[in-house]
Amino acid sequence: MASKAKTTIGDMAWPAAFIACLVWLVWYFPRFIIYAGLANDNLNSGYMTAGAVDFALMAGAVIALVMGLRSVRTTAGEGEIETPIDRLSLFLGRVTMLLVVILVAVMAYEVTLRYVFERPTLWANEMSLWMAGFIFLLSGLYAMQQRSHIRIYLLYDVFPRSVQRVCDVISTALICLFAAAMIWGSWNEARDKFLRWETFGTAFDPPIPATLKPLILLVMVLVALQAVANLIADWRKGPETHGVIDEGEVEEMIQTARAQHEQGRHD
Amino acid sequence: MFDIGTISTLLLLAMLGLLAIGMPLGFASAILAVGVLVMKFGPDLLFSSFGTGPLNILAQRIYGLLTDYVLISIPLFIFMANLLERSGIAAEMYNSLNVWLNRTRGGIAIVTSIMAVIMAAMSGIIGGEVVLLGLIALPQMLRLGYDRNLAIGTICASGSLGTMIPPSIVLIIYGLITETSIKALFTASFLPGFILASFFILYIVVRTRLNPGLAPLPELEIGEPELAEKRKLFGTFLLTLVGGFAAALFLRALFLTLTGQNTAREGVEDIAFGTPVYVVIFGVVVLAAVALIFGVMGRERFRTSWSMGKGLVGPMVVIGVVLGSIYGGITGITEAAGMGVIAVGVIATLRGEMSFNLLAEALKRTLKSTGTIIWVTIGATALAGAYTIAGGPTFIASTIVGSDLPTMGVILIMMAIFLVLGAFMDWVGIVLLVIPVFLPIILRLPIEEIGLFGELNPAHLSIWFGVVFCMNMQVSFLSPPFGPAAFYLKSVAPPEISLTDIFRGFLPFIAIQLVALSLLLIWPPLVSVFL
């Protein structure tokens, strides 16, 4: 049965712990590059090598990831978990949801400081930009797991299930091919920017190129894996008909609208 | 390897093929971007050395898109709309509007339209709006014996206004990919959107006046104030709103004066409504409003009017925060969206509706919608990048412009393509795949031949086309056989109302939309009025 569970604070605990560890790790990641002996002179002079705290937090992030993957569950409207990669996509989805909240908080902080106190921060805009990059990429992975990417079902729905399977195989193969083409063309640039820990070149100077360039490739691969997982998970399922609008989504809209309407009447 | 004509033809065929087999739009575009590069450079050059080569263009385009600050406004506006949908702000607004207008002929239909405009100005996502109105307003109109077609058409046509009235995600994406100022697009679309909404209301008023049987009036409820008294109550409520608004601006001007932020400086533009003289002006307005309310109208009337109208305050605050941030010069679009999220969150908290689950549900939907919209954008950006390198848009523009077609003929063909595509495809796909091909053509058409009257300012050309595009998408929400508004309404309508009934109800409203569209085509400077 598809889950109807409410999302609780418990669902967000490990994702939150994961983000907390990652904040440190990402900011001081050059220490690990130095530790691995891959750093250039510029990094070597700017950072020290990874120490006990760094490795402790690295262990913390791994624990949070593992525990998060073990404990992640679907809540109302999210279907069910069928493959291991579903777990990863859902966990990263939870992480991304928290990032959206943090993004809003950062913006509110910046606007308050700038408008009320006339003391704008140096970091808030670039921080938003950086986090948004993560949000954009990872939300696509979540959308892939949830099968909510925009498709046109006009002909697809008319096909018999066997033809639909062939269509799905072609689609999935092409998605994998695209991921491969991306890596083929961009591997060197992503690797170089990562190892050089290339920054944005501004006052706050966040490592946006160093993190986003490799992340584009990484998420592309994860999305392709999720597409393969979807293909396998949906293989045995019967044909589905798709309306113009998402039925689950509308069901939820109706419930919320009805609840508000009832509430309004008692006023 | 191939010439650009062959590439364009193959690209179109492959795109149709991939969409037909149900491949996700974003990924179909993405793999076709690779396809275009293969056709342009040949596989030998492309795959000669691992890790580099022309394919890197794709990642560069995607990286450029992801680090565009304006793009952040999309998840934020979606988040705001989702919070709004789950709070009771909209339902209470309906009740408030209804109290004021239920004695007017066709009142509930008018309430529906006004409510849709206000909701459009708050978020601009159509699904939830149509569902909510279909659930609240439709049963009420049917119970009162309103004409069914009128009721259906009003709900769906008004509920689709979200794309025309700022903030609109369609316009944000349009602005993003065409590098047009989004603020200018918002400003330009406001008047056409408002005209369209007024046409709807005018249509309702005229039809129900001509034939009162279409919209019977409800019985007077016991304890409900008489019409004359209601007018006075409404006056009191308006005064309260004016007073409250002036008080907010008074505090702002006072704050700016006390902190000395508004001292006149050479070369720096004065803050709008923020110079010291406004402290006095707004102070007087507040005092006058308070004096009128308590001196002339009376305390009792003030209380009644407040309880009747307070549902309108929340939406006005939200609109004030979002549009005020954009036009008051406080923040850009992106931060205005962030402020909108905060405003809706605070109001929902004050109303006692905020909960962890509500937040999580809103975030889940936000993530899904963001993922789908952004990844179509990612795929289309890659494709547009590859196609531009292959010389596609220039080739198509030259072909069309060189073919001696009349200018308005070309534009009308484009409108037809928009309308046909809109019946089958989401607006996201159209704006991302078709606009990059159409806009270069528009930009090269002789500008004096665009429109029948008046000459469009050349700087406003791409803005005009964006607004025209938006108007087309209005029609696509209603047009059979796949207009999504019909399906949203069907999901909440009584079972005896069939899809055919719903689409039949749309017909006069589609006609009104086409009239508004022709207005833009006949007199293009309409978009420049507020620019």
Image (cartoon, helix red, strand yellow):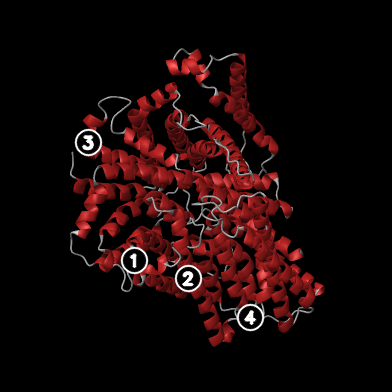
The spot of residue B509 in percent (x, y) is: 47, 73
Give the residue type at disc 2: Leu
Q: Earlier in the sequence, mark 1 or mark 4?
A: 4
Q: Earlier in the sequence, mark 2 or mark 1?
A: 2
Is the residue at mark 3 from the same chain as the one at mark 2? yes
Mark yes or no: residue B442 visible: yes
Q: What mark, if any, has residue B41 been given in the picture? A: 3
Q: Which label lies toward us, 1 or 4?
A: 1
Q: What mark, if any, has residue B456 been given in the picture? A: 1
Instruction: Name the subunit of mark 1.
Output: B
Is the residue at mark 2 from the same chain as the one at mark 4? yes
How packed is label 3: few (under 14 Cα within 10 Å), some, or many (20 or more)? some
**Label 2 SS:** helix
**Label 3 SS:** helix
Instruction: Name the subunit of mark 3.
Output: B
**C-alpha gap between disc 2 and disc 4:** 21 Å
Give the residue type at disc 1: Leu
Q: Is residue A148 left or right of residue B308?
A: left
